[in-house]
Amino acid sequence: MFKSALVGMALLFATGAAADQPVSVELVLRSSQTIAEQQIELPQGPVEVTGSIFTIQPGASLPVHRHAFARYGYMLAGELTVSNQETGKKQTFHAGEMIIESIGKWHSGSNSGQVPVKLFVLDQAPMGAQTTELKDKD
């Protein structure tokens, strides 16, 4: 029973579901690189998975920071502009889009829209590791 259910789910995920089906799957993103075009590599050994929802009010900005490990975000609402401090590159993300954050690159995010940003963030890092480092103000 369990094996056949897994096979059925695999077929559903592989093919998607027709509009008249009670369940459907929409691929949002498939990538092996971050937004800074870095290859994604997972930490070795036991990991801790953390999920958070960030709410960023219109006009508000996150401080300049960087991540030591892979971090994934899914835009639930609003408009978020991410600025890479090292390259000057800016990217804007909207509700329904995924963000694979850069690793080890200083960046910041700001709400460039008129409604609060709701961003679901998923971290996968070694147990107890600090996933975000804030840049000292010069």
Image (cartoon, grey):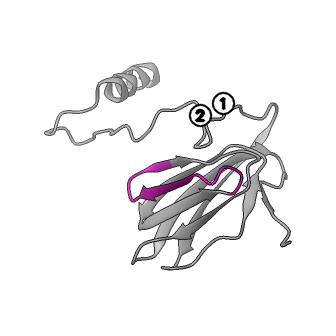
Residue kind at label 2, given as amino acid type: Gln
Question: Mark 2 and mark 1: span between their CA atoms?
Answer: 5 Å
Residue 62 x, y percent position in the rendering: 65, 70
Is residue 55 part of the magenta span, yes or no?
no
Image quarter for residue 34? top right
Residue 12 vs residue 129, the one in the foreground: 129
Q: Which mark is residue 33?
A: 2
Residue found 73% across the figure and 55% down from its top:
106
Q: Is residue 8 above or below residue 84?
A: above
Crowd class of label 2 (few under 14; some 14 to 19; many from 20; radius 10 Å): some
Q: Residue at x 28, y 39 (%)?
A: 24
Q: Is residue 16 above or below residue 1?
A: below
Quadrant housing residue 114: bottom left
- Quadrant containing the N terminus in the rendered view: top left
Q: Which residues are magenta?
A: 85-98
- For image coordinates 53% across by 59% down, the residue present is 120
Name which residue lies at 22% across and 42% down: 22
Q: For label 1, count other residues whose C-alpha is less than 10 Å away and answer few (under 14), some (14-19) or many (20+).
A: some
On screen, 44 above or below 79? Answer: above
Foreground: 124 or 62? Answer: 62
Count of numbered circles in the view: 2
Q: Is residue 88 magenta?
A: yes
98 relative position to 134: left or right: left
Residue 14 at what x, y percent from top left? Answer: 35, 24
5 or 77: nearer the eye? 77
Q: Residue 39 shows which numbered tag?
A: 1
Quadrant holding the C terminus = bottom right
> On the picture, is 71 further left or further right than 47?
left
User: x, y percentage for residue 127?
Assistant: 83, 47
In the rendered view, does 61 fall on the left or right side of 25? Answer: right
